[in-house]
Image: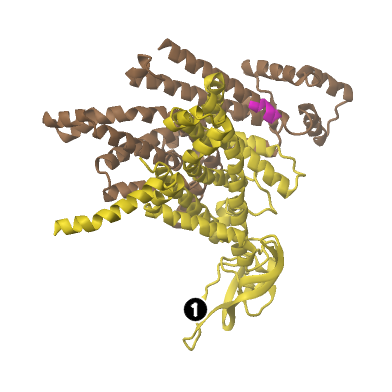
Amino acid sequence: MITYITRRLVLALVTCWAISVISFIIIQLPPGDFVNSYIANLSASGSMVSAAEADAMREQYGLNRPIWVQYGKWMGRVLQGDFGMSMEWGRPVLEVIGDRLWLTIVISIAAIILTWGIALPIGIYSAVRQYSIADYIFTLIGFIGLAVPNFLLALIIMYLGFKYFGANIGGLFSPEYDLAPWSWDKVWDLMSHLPLPAFILALAGTAQLIRIMRANLLDELRRPYVTTARARGLQEWRVIMKYPVRAALNPFASTIGYLLPFVVSGSIVVSLVLSLPTVGPLLLRALVAQDMFLAGAIVLLLGVLTVIGTFLSDLMLMWIDPRIRAGMHG
Amino acid sequence: MSAAISTAAAPVTTAAEEKVAVATQLQLTWWRFRRHKVAVASGVIVLFFYLVAVLADFLATNDPYATLAARSYIPPQEIHWFDADGSFRPHVFALEGKRDMKTFRLVYVADPEDKRYLELFVDGYPYRLLGLFETNLHLLGLDRGAPEEALFLLGTDQLGRDFWSRLVLATRTSLFIGLAGVAISLFLGVLLGGISGMYGGWIDTVIQRVIEILRSIPTIPLWMGLAAALPATWSVLQVYLAITVIISLIGWTELARVVRGRFLSLREEDFVMAAELAGASQLRIIFRHMVPSFLSHIIAAVSLALPAMIISETTLSFLGLGLRPPAISWGVLLQDAQNIQALAIAPWLLMAAIPVIVVILAFNFLGDGLRDAADPYG
């Protein structure tokens, strides 16, 4: 059990390191360095920077040092919670991101809970009533969910909402709460806006989960212990829910590791279409404006949070599955 | 009577069994695949779309790049199939653009008196058929009329470009960027997956961890970051290639996983052992004995990887970070339909979503059928 946790932890740390390298590459990719664009920004607003000042600034940020020293300095600052300044907004990056990061997490978690909520009962139903009409219909809907890219689904739903209800269904808050400080009413308002984006995000992931659940449960249902339970006169409902479903649930929980990055990715694009106040629109703007510290910070934070989420789901999996706890596999 | 049937049926069965016994792996896979009706139908749809992609210019009715302010946002034209006397002569009514004095938008009024007949094989803008033959022959067009009165099957966009023509050209771009991306992914996947499965040990561990890391990173922010760094001065072709590479750099993991799995299981098979004992070289064992028996698995994995590639390109272009105008792809077209204002004025621009959904769905069904068929003994 300890080896399992250690292994997962090491892998998570290595992944975080890989993400930090990629984020750093993204920051470095545009031509010119941070000081160049900073000076260009300042001169655009009228103030001049002398060459000596520019050199001092390069010295301070270590821009005239080898690339790995720059990376080290950047990482050092990041670990202290200093992600640098956003060029476009003229404020610290973390301040610009603000609530948006938490809203991204809230939407992603809501989408995953909804994915499970949809896929679990449908998966069980499709397995128990294999080849029934409902089984086929659910499979088809699942496939369509898989085939429609979620930005397209958001676009279509937005258009239908506009056409038939005459309302713009984007956003996460009603206008009166948009700029208001947090309160219970605002949380409630958020809750009432959450289902639609969560549903759009969830639909893409359900198809796969339904199929996994269906296949696993079908395997379990053929096992002799199910026949034994039936022969003992257990009610059909209990027979299915008590043993096969629990056994089939296992790989279900382990897919969260792949589901989470997928949902976080999707939330970026869906947020853009539905203009949700998550990090998605911010990231796109930062990239277009080449506000690289902001963009790099968002990529880094999203990546690291996803890894943390996956690690937590691994721990959860261990709690669910006694075989992993006993060190039999994993 | 039952005896008569069994004697009559017996030779037939043996002939069929014999056929199965000597069939190659690919033949068996094909026979198995043929039974999967939905997958076969999906395969036909996919082939049809690639045919459209190859013949895109021939199918286009107008120059997809030609802009004309006088024909901005023309709604899809209604085709009337029968003439007044009941004979079959498809035609459209000539359109006259008038400015609505309240909204200052162009509104188009059809004139039922002025009929334009549809004709096959008409002359249009010049292009190269299959990139080889210079021609100006197009499948469909009108018998007469000025450029602003041409045939607009699916309407026009804001700049007055014909949407149907743009859609068929976008089909070409999007489908072939998928193919190119999968080709690169396939190369990486087979190479790294093969090494991983064949040699095992620490190389296997390293490659497996790299795959695990790549799969646990949210891809879209990553793509966005990399794609945004492409210099704005790059040509359409350079951007096209760069986007393909960016997408496939992350897309190879699934293919590598499949290849590794097959290598691992085949390595222990008796026929591989037999080939080794017979003194066959490593390369011969891999390409003569192992590859044919998992080729169908790779084909299945490829047809499941293609839709993912197409979605990636469409998403990136939709965000404005992938292909940029003047390139035309499904994502670029959907970018025009991005906000509610545009959709309210020109809802037909959302039609670019239809081929995306149909192709991705067809590829998924096809890949599913192929994956089931890839194990013909199962």
Find residue B158 and report its horizontal and vertical position in percent.
64, 60
How many numbered discs sit on the rendered protein?
Answer: 1
A324 or B316, which is in the foreground? A324
Residue that carries the numbered disc 1 in the rendered image:
B81
- The chain carrying label 1 is B
Q: Main secondary structure of the magenta part?
A: helix
Find residue B214 and report its horizontal and vertical position in percent.
56, 29
Q: Is B98 part of what is drawn in magenta?
A: no
Left or right: residue B149 compared with residue B287: right
Tell me the colour chain B is drawn in: yellow
Left or right: residue A26 compared with residue A201: right
* Colouring scheme, one of rainbow, by chain, secondary structure, one colour: by chain
Tell me the colour chain A is drawn in: brown
- Residue A55 to residue B375: above or below: above
- Residue A169 to residue A278: above or below: below
Q: Residue at x 42, y 55 (%)?
A: B40
- Residue A236 to residue B45: above or below: above
Q: On the rendered image, what quadrant is the C terminus of chain B found in?
A: top left
B9 or A7, which is in the foreground? B9
Q: Residue at x 56, y 25 (%)?
A: B207
Q: Which residues are magenta?
A: A22-27
Q: Amino acid type of disc 1?
A: Trp
Find residue B70 and report its horizontal and vertical position in percent.
68, 69
Quarter holding residue B92 = bottom right
Residue at the farthest right position: A51
